[in-house]
Amino acid sequence: MGSLGKLFSFSPLAALIEVYCGIFGVMVVILEGQDFSYLKRFRSILNENAKFLTFTWGRGLFYMFAGSLMVSQFNLFDMAIGGWMCFVGFTSVVVGATTANKLTDLKLSLASEKVVKEKFQEMDADGSGNLDSKELAQLCKSLGSSLDHNELEAALMTMDCNKDGQISFDEFMGWWAGWKHEKDDLKGQFAV
């Protein structure tokens, strides 16, 4: 009812902010909702058109922006929810940064394609050809980059291209090879 009151108020700015908060709220539900079939389509549209939302830091910045809009409404309910969203956003940015550092260390410990393949197969305990979250955690731990729960979720989000909750060998190799090519490109740019 409070939202409807703001929409029909004499303040166009308050009404516009309320509309944006509603749209952003729907976007958060689509991004963070369980994998219901009707949400997958909308999630893929969001991820395709706003690629920064596929990264933990991108979602974090989005949540901080949406939260700051809610805080600007200056009522207790909106300020509490907005403050919580800013906190979650800040936490996501921090988790994304630490995960990126740990994944960089992981990539450095995988010296060649042969090592990548051997480690992947070694950690694929069930022989499915995919790593689930537990197997990925074991792989990271065996290479000296232990991940906590949030970091593991961020790593899965980074590597799992088809968003099926598991990392195939091709996805893992693509993640590793993409970094290797970026590193080789940087070396070429600074070569004398």
Image (spheres, helix red, strand yellow):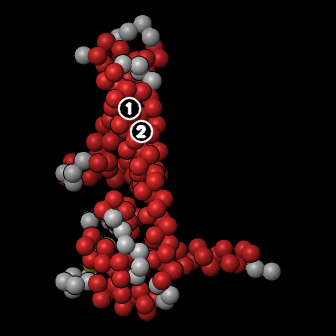
How many numbered marks have been drawn onto this rendered protein structure? 2
Q: Is residue 26 above or below residue 153?
A: above
The residue tagged 1 is 82
Q: Secondary structure at mark 2?
A: helix
Q: Quadrant of the N terminus?
A: top left
Q: Secondary structure at mark 1?
A: helix
In the rendered image, residue 175, in percent from the top left (x then y), is placed at 44, 73
In the rendered image, residue 17, in percent from the top left (x then y), is placed at 43, 23
Q: In the displayed orientation, state which residue is furthest to the right.
A: 192
Q: In the displayed orientation, state which residue is furthest to the top.
A: 10
Q: Residue at x 26, y 83 (%)?
A: 124
Asked if residue 97 lies left or right of residue 35, the reply is right
Image-quadrant location for residue 81: top left
Front residue (pair 147, 31): 147
Q: Is residue 99 above or below residue 42?
A: below
For the residue marked with disc 1, what is the amino acid?
Gly
Asked if residue 123 lies left or right of residue 10, the reply is left
Q: Are marks 2 and 1 in contact (CB under 8 Å)?
A: yes
Image-quadrant location for residue 128: bottom left
The residue tagged 2 is 86
Mark 1 burial class by Cα count in 10 Å: few <14, some 14-19, many 20+: many
Q: Residue at x 32, y 35 (%)?
A: 25
Q: Is residue 137 visible?
A: yes
Front residue (pair 119, 23): 119
Q: Residue at x 41, y 21 (%)?
A: 73
Q: Is residue 156 above or below residue 118?
A: above
In the rendered image, residue 59, in percent from the top left (x then y), is placed at 42, 48
In the rendered image, residue 52, in percent from the top left (x then y), is placed at 47, 52
CA distance for labels 2 and 1: 6 Å
Mark 2 burial class by Cα count in 10 Å: few <14, some 14-19, many 20+: many
